[in-house]
Image (tube, grey):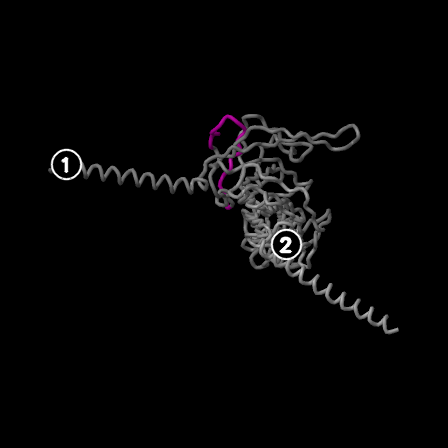
Amino acid sequence: MIVLRTRLDIMFWTFGVLTLALLCLGVNGTNSVHDVQWLPCQFVDEKVHINEEGHTETNYIHREAVLQFGNVGDSPLHPTITFLVTGSKVDMRRYLEGDEDTLHCETRRYSTGGIVMRWPITGAQDHDVWFTCTIRHTKGLFVITTFLRHTPTASAQGQMDYLQWLTVNDRDLLTTSAAMVVLTRTPSVEVGFLKEPNLHCQFAVDHKLPNATVEWRLQRHGERTKLFSYSSRTGKSEGSGVAVKAIAAGNASFKLQPTRKLSEGTYICSVMVPPLYGSHDIPLSLSEQPRVSLNVGSTLSITLGTDQKLICDAEGYYPLDVNIEWYREPFGGSPTPLFLKNVLYSSHRLHKDGTYSLSAFFLLQPSMEDSGYKYTCRVSHKSLLTPIRKSFSLIVTEPDSTMWYIKVFVFIILMVVILYYALQYLARQNAAKKRF
């Protein structure tokens, strides 16, 4: 008995340890993306030259690289180009979400556009070289762009712009520091009419009181319109939609007015801290699902020899493209429904709120063989994951024989009455002629 109890205690203890270990693994799995030591991060290198016509041409070269987080002096973890991101007040990992498998990382060179100035932080040099690291969530949760500052050796001074890039070999280790990050958690937005979405834009810089300029612009049909701007140097702002007080904490999100058709376009959030300029494009599209209805109920009973106009209405949808089809199939379904070809369509009707409507109709002249079939209107639209279907069952009945006899009897009586009065009229006419 004592041995059995000891074994049970050991089993429960072992089970508890395993459970705790699994829980710890689960917690670490959830938070591991914030503590990740490295990420595969393709380096899109550039080879820039001036062609014979005097124009600048750029060839992009995709090279294997990794993003490694650590300290100055760390050895590379992989035999590839390694961007070693050392500690600073900006840590891009704190903004990451999801699993490592859902992250797509890409590093590029960054040109300051000929601006030569020292980044206002200890250790920065006039000849610093810049790179951008962009991490995208493959399911569209966020896009993060980080500016990486690299101080080359003294022999590399002067190699600082796109015509004189710093040479990067296949197994080089480039020690960098994250200077600024710009991110959005709304990489694309799809909403309905009269909504007030919040377009997220956030930034962080590795030093206090940066000389920052924040702007929002709307690009629509090839034209850009400024919606908002703010300069921390002057303290002045133009436009609306952004809480100016929140900018000091790095929040530059934009609140839209109730959406309408003219709200569609690409919204651009940009943050400039000289000599760095970061921006994110946020496309916004409008979408409204159609409301579908039929002009008959779920069952239509019709007498042989009569006809019925069937109308399927799709109303209040946006954008314009919609597809309406009528088909029929035996009750209970069929793998090969018969699509009707005698369907007519109205024109698209535009409503005041910017949505559209469309009707699809046909004239039903059924035979007795059509009875028992199910007729369905199917509406497809980009706002729908699956088409909307509205159906009715058809019942065709023969004319009532009793009513037919009644109609014949009434017709005969009516003819007799007409004949009687006609004969009476003729008799009076003949009597009148005899008098004269």
Specify the amino acid type for callout 1: Leu
Residue 272: x %, y % from top left? 63, 48
Quadrant that contains the C terminus:
bottom right
Q: Name the secondary structure under disc 1.
A: helix
Judge whether 132 appears above or below 365 on screen.
above
Q: Name the secondary structure under disc 2.
A: strand
**Which residue carries the number 2 mark?**
315
Front residue of 129/280: it is: 280
Residue placed furthest toward the bottom:
435
Residue 121 visible to an observer of this rendering: no
Residue 247: x %, y % from top left? 57, 55
Residue placed furthest toward the right:
436
Judge whether 107 appears above or below 361 on screen.
above
Which of label 1 and label 2 is nearer to you?
2
Q: Any magenta on residue 88?
A: yes
The segment highlighted magenta reads 74-89
Residue 215: x %, y % from top left? 65, 52
Label 1 neighbourhood size at 10 Å, few (<14), some (14-19), many (20+)?
Answer: few
**Which residue carries the number 1 mark?**
4
Predominant SS of the magenta segment: loop
Specify the amino acid type for callout 2: Glu
Q: Residue at x 61, y 32 (%)?
A: 44
